Image (cartoon, helix red, strand yellow):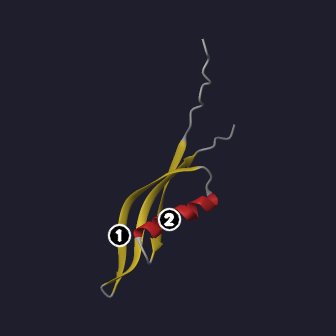
Amino acid sequence: MATRAKKSDSVYKVIELVGTSPDSWEKAAASAVGAAAKTLRDLRIAEVVEMDMQLENGKVRAYRVKIKVSFKYERED
């Protein structure tokens, strides 16, 4: 009978970020993920939770996206 290696339990932390772009919601989301990737390791999931636009004189000034980003929580042993 073969033995299976037991996977260790994992814990993930979730934070909210807001990205902005003058061009699109997609670029706004990518901006937020790019900023997070500079300081956080092992990013796992980014979920868009809200999208809105900043308006000025009846025109779109910026697209804004609120995202939840999860990353692996590393415990100090």
Secondary structure at numbered mark 1: strand
Identify residue type, mark 2: Ala
Sort mark 2 into few (<14), some (14-19) or many (20+) by Cα contacts within 10 Å: some
Which residue in the structure is indicated by mark 2?
30
- Residue 63 x/y as whole percent: 40, 73
Q: Nearer the viewer, residue 67 or 44?
A: 44
Q: Residue at x 57, y 60 (%)?
A: 36
Specify few, some or many for label 1: CA neighbours under 10 Å numbering under 14, 14-19, or 20 or more: few
The quarter of the rendered structure image containing the N terminus is top right
Pointer 1 and pointer 2: residues touching (CB < 8 Å)?
Answer: no
**Which one is earlier in the sequence, the residue at label 1 or at label 2?**
2
Give the vertical position of 7 relative to 61 (above or below): above
Query: Is 48 on the left or on the right of 5, as rendered?
Result: left
52 sits left or right of 10 in the view = left
Among the 4 quarters of the image, the one containing residue 6: top right
Residue at image coords 44%, 78%? 22
**Residue 53, placed above or below residue 13:** below
Closer to us: 3 or 10: 3
- Disc marking residue 52: 1
Give the structural element (helix, strand or loop) at label 2. Answer: helix
